[in-house]
Image (spheres, grey):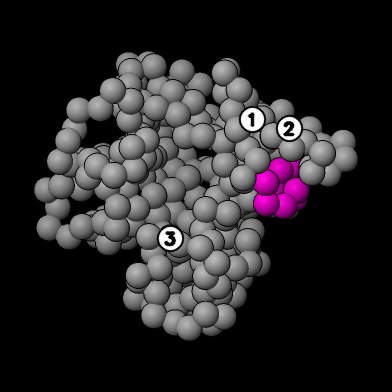
Amino acid sequence: MLTKEQVEQFERDGYIKGDVVLSDDEVEVLRAELDLVMSGQSVKKPVLNRNLLDGNTEYGMNMVKSETVVQIVNIWMASDAFLKHAGNPKICEEIAQLCGTDTLRIWHDQIQYKPPVTGGPTAWHQDHPAWPIIQPADLISAWVALDDAVIDNGCMWMVPGSHKWGDHNRYLDSTADFKPFHREPHLLPSGVDTTAVPFEIKKGQVGYHHCLTWHGSPHNRSEMKRRAIAVHYMPDHIRFEPTGRHPMETHIAVEPGKQLVGDSFPVVWTASSVTSA
């Protein structure tokens, strides 16, 4: 469980660092599974496996890129080890605590791997505006590092308090030195500070962030890998409300306005399972 101070910090800033939740051995298992899926050798396949910076190429079919961010969406569908990770009891209990829910489902998960030297940037953004088929904006992500994520190898940066400012995704940009830049600052609440801070995470450690928190990560020009798994969790009241398109839309079998449930959005935690344990 998170402390009262951690919950208050999350409510204020829109993100917090959690504990180390994976042992070295558990990290190695996930790294091996990632290599298998990323190279296209797994029997089951994820929803997406691509270089995020070109958006079209199946990464396993063309491994040579001048600038790369490997994005794998729903690796849990291709790997039982990653499905087990999504149900990590400590992570799920703490996410549920932050969400105030008694049931958690997977919206989807996402690998972002920045290889050494050629790892590209992940532009400044908010998550929920990129998910224009679900409401409300109450999702929380658990981002677990599979390598130390530090400034040198392209760790995430966050803007404290930005989850309270609404949807500004269409106005977000980056300066040449990768600071967040809002193209229409008069639309922001008066007096807000858009200064970003680094969100360094140790191997096996979890970080939590709200789906409206501004975040991004610069290039990896180091000799270190930067691998991570983010699971985007839905509290029980999330609805299917299509106002745009998303790769997960073809996996949805409920009518607009209905609670988003189904085999592609499995329940990974309930309060009753903890009570009965």
Tell me the magenta residue range. 161-168
Pointer 2 residue:
194
Say what amino acid the circle numbered 3 marks.
His
Pointer 1 residue:
180
Report the mark closest to the observer, 3 or 2. 3
The reply to whether discs 2 and 1 touch (Cβ–Cβ < 8 Å) is yes
> Where residue 81 sits in the image (x, y, percent)?
27, 55
Q: Quadrant of residue 159?
A: top right
Pointer 3 residue:
246
Q: Quadrant of residue 35?
A: top left
Residue at image position (47%, 34%) is: 122
Task: Provide the secondary structure element on which disc 3 rests.
Answer: loop
Q: Main secondary structure of the magenta part?
A: loop
> Where residue 114 sits in the image (x, y, percent)?
36, 30
Using the image, determine if residue 10 lies above or below residue 70. below
Q: Is residue 103 visible?
A: no
Answer whether residue 163 is magenta in the image: yes
Using the image, determine if residue 184 lies above or below residue 121. below
Q: Earlier in the sequence, mark 2 or mark 1?
A: 1
Viewer-proximal residue among 249 and 32: 249
> Where residue 219 sits in the image (x, y, percent)?
44, 23
> Where residue 199 sits in the image (x, y, percent)?
57, 32
